[in-house]
């Protein structure tokens, strides 16, 4: 496995994870878990204008560079509506032709409405490697269980990575997966999925079934740490609205992994690892002023580490906090640590 292009940022967070896990349980050396890179699990090419996994591309808008991720098949059909153009055989042809007619702000706004993962390069510049911890309740009224009880509702890479770090520390982690929308990583990269979910108990629930919905809520209200990866609207449909959850479980640490932040005007934006990395400025710039991807979905591992740090610090503070850890913001912090120039 090669050295990550953001090794210095990862090392900084890995050191903090090791120290924090040692205070609660077993010291975790994250590099030993084999979860920081997907090399060998995904067919990757050299990074350039196209991401190594081929799903995301950098392109020019009217006023600068952007990234669009079409990892989901259904997103390809949304490109004409996003750009206001006729449908063509190749959505990337439409992007190349029509994106220059729109500003980055207009494209971001339209992408948000359509739930398309798109971002302006460098828009999420950030110097703080720590995710904000928002006080949502007075704090713990009972001591956390020993080992801490963790409910992991997340999918893909960053959220499950946080969960497996806690499991390696010795926490009791239950991964609850939707029977209707299982994690695609299970089939796409089975060995990587196994590594991200080692040491966790697994439970499949149908959120549309009243009995399963009640089981989900009971598990969350008994947890010390909750990890989510959905947007606020989707979680509210499951009965997981922060005010109500913290009122019933004031000692909870809720780790909310999102694209651009769980709170605020960008809460409904969608992001994946590559487009979020570009939004954070995790790119290299050519002498001609064009960005290029640095590596594979780099926002994911740095976000997973930041989420674990936030979870453990929130637990140490007595709970009652929401850790608002965003892919794009974490990428921005990594870009700052790595000294990448901020050009848009």
Image (tube, rainbow, N blue to C red):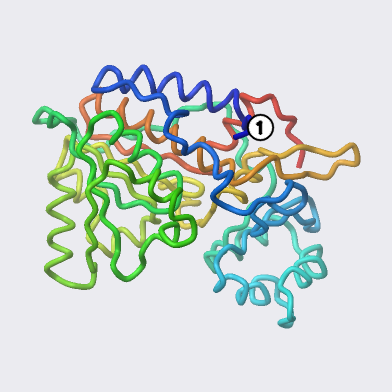
Compare residues 14 and 75 and report the one nearer the observer.
Answer: 14
Q: In the displayed structure, would residue 269 be above or below residue 81?
A: above
Q: In the displayed structure, would residue 166 be above or below residue 154?
A: above
Q: Quadrant of residue 122?
A: top right
- 226 with respect to 257 (left or right): left
Mark 1 sits on what residue? 5
Point out the residue furthest to the left here.
Answer: 142
Q: In the displayed structure, would residue 130 be above or below residue 39?
A: above
Compare residues 8 and 30 and report the one nearer the observer.
Answer: 30
Q: Quadrant of residue 145?
A: top left
Tell me the quarter of the image containing the N terminus: top right
- Residue 45 location (% of width, % of height): 71, 50
Identify which residue is drawn at 13% across, 62% down. 214
Identify which residue is drawn at 67% across, 38% down. 281
Identify which residue is drawn at 26% across, 38% down. 136
- Residue 7 location (% of width, % of height): 60, 27
Q: In the displayed structure, would residue 14 be above or below residue 50?
A: above
- Residue 326 location (% of width, % of height): 48, 42
């Amino acid at each position: 496995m090669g050295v990550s292009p953001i090794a210095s940022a990862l090392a900084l967070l890995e050191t903090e994870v090791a120290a924090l896990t040692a205070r609660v349980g077993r010291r975790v050396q994250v590099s030993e878990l084999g979860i920081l890179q997907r090399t060998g699990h995904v067919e990757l090419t050299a990074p350039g204008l196209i991401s190594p996994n081929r799903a995301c591309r950098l392109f020019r808008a009217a006023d600068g560079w952007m990234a669009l991720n079409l990892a989901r098949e259904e997103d390809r059909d949304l490109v004409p509506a996003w750009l206001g153009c006729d449908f063509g055989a190749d959505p990337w042809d439409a992007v190349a032709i029509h994106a220059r007619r729109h500003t980055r702000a207009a494209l971001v706004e339209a992408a948000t409405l359509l739930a398309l993962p798109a971002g302006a390069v460098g828009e999420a510049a950030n110097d703080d490697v720590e995710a904000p911890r928002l006080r949502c309740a007075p704090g713990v009224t009972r001591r956390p269980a020993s080992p801490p009880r963790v409910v992991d509702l997340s999918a893909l890479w960053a959220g499950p990575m946080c969960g497996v770090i806690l499991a390696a520390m010795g926490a009791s982690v239950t991964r609850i997966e939707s029977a209707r929308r299982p994690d695609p990583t299970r089939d796409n990269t089975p060995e990587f999925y196994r590594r991200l979910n080692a040491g966790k108990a697994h439970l499949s629930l149908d959120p549309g079934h009243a009995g399963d919905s009640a089981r989900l809520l009971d598990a969350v209200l008994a947890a010390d740490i909750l990890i989510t990866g959905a947007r606020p609207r989707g979680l509210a449909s499951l009965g997981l609205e922060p005010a109500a959850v913290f009122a019933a479980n004031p000692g909870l640490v809720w780790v909310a992994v999102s694209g651009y932040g769980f709170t605020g005007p960008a809460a409904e934006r969608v992001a994946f690892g590559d487009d979020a990395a570009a939004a954070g400025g995790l790119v290299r710039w050519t002498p001609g002023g064009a960005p290029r991807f640095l590596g594979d979905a780099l926002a994911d591992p740095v976000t997973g580490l930041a989420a674990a740090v936030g979870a453990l610090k929130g637990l140490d503070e007595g709970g009652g906090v929401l850790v608002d850890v965003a892919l794009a913001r974490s990428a921005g912090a990594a870009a700052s640590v790595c000294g990448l120039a901020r050009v848009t």
